[in-house]
Image: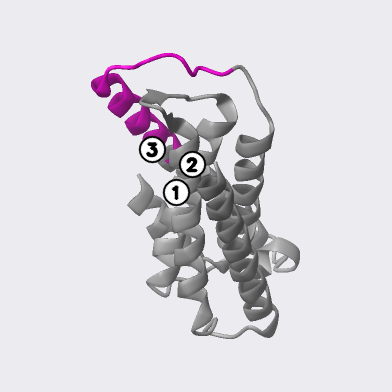
């Protein structure tokens, strides 16, 4: 339990630090976010993975309670967006939205108990199926959010209103490329 809480703390601090760096980079319109960003993201993702792993796989049994599954979903989403960001694509605005949600999902998974499914021993094939489903749900959810963001961005461009959220979004072509990568 202690290892899980330490991993959660590392993840939350990493997510918070990366979010602050990205907000500062967006405000200053900097092209680079500095050298700390990859280290913070990596620490956050590893901590989040360890925490979620300890919550779901316990004593040889699997517990896919709602908040634990949500934590796994947000880990996949954060990992995907982070991999895109580390490849120098302009997705800082997505990181700023995703990292706090990933932190909240971890807090809920650790401190809010729903109807537990522990005590159920699942066949490894069923566990693999559930994990694959979580991964697929994560990627398709991210693609749906990306499509919504593209729609909002396109509407803002057509109406010549590039204020508010539209000024922080990446170029439309980059957003479309990312959506096709997701699909």
Identity of the residue drawn at 63% across and 83% down: 29
Q: Main secondary structure of the magenta part?
A: helix
Disc 2: CA contacts within 10 A as few (<14), some (14-19) or many (>=20): many
Q: Is residue 63 above or below residue 155?
A: above
Within the image, what quadrant is residue 59 found in? top left
Image location (x, y in percent) of residue 61: 39, 23
Residue at the spot of label 1? 49
Q: Residues within 10 Å of mark 3 (few under 14, many from 20)?
A: some
Q: Which contiguous range is marked in magenta?
A: 116-138
Q: Provide the residue designation for mark 2.
A: 52
Residue at 41%, 42% in the rendered image: 139
Contact (Cβ within 8 Å) of mark 3 with mark 1: no
Residue located at (41% from left, 71% from top) = 86
Q: Secondary structure at mark 3?
A: helix
Q: Secondary structure at mark 1?
A: helix
Front residue of 134 and 160:
134
Q: Counting residues from the N terminus, which is met first, the one under dot 2 or under dot 3?
A: 2
Marks 3 and 1 sit apart, C-alpha to C-alpha, by 13 Å
Depth check, mark 2 against mark 3: the one in front is: 2
User: Quick one: 44 or 179, which is closer to the camera?
Assistant: 44
**Residue depicted at 48% across the width and 41% down the height:** 52
Q: How is the image coloured?
A: one colour
Give the quadrant of the C terminus. Answer: top left
Crowding near pointer 1: few (<14 within 10 Å), some, many (20+)?
A: many
Are the residues tagged 2 and 1 within 8 Å (C-beta)? yes
Given residues 98 and 61, the one toward you in this image is: 61
Q: CA distance from mark 2 to mark 1?
A: 5 Å
Q: Is residue 170 visible?
A: yes
Residue carrying label 3: 135
Task: Give the camera-side residue of 111 and 27.
Answer: 111
Which secondary structure lies at badge 2?
A: helix
For residue 131: magenta?
yes
């Amino acid at each position: 339990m202690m290892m899980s809480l330490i991993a959660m703390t590392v993840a939350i601090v990493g997510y918070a630090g990366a979010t602050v760096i990205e907000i500062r980079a967006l405000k200053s319109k900097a092209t680079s976010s500095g050298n700390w960003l990859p280290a913070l993201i990596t620490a956050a993702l590893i901590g989040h993975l360890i925490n979620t792993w300890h919550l779901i796989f316990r004593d040889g049994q699997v517990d896919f309670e709602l908040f634990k599954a949500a934590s796994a979903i947000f880990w996949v989403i954060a990992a995907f967006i982070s991999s895109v960001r580390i490849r120098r694509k302009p997705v800082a605005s997505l990181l700023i939205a995703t990292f706090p949600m990933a932190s909240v999902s971890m807090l809920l998974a650790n401190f809010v108990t729903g109807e537990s499914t522990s005590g159920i021993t699942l066949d490894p094939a069923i566990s693999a199926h559930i994990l694959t489903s979580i991964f697929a749900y994560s990627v398709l959810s991210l693609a749906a959010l990306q499509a919504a963001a593209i729609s909002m961005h396109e509407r803002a461009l057509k109406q010549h209103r590039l204020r508010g959220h539209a000024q922080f979004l990446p170029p439309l072509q980059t957003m479309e490329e990312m959506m096709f990568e997701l699909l």
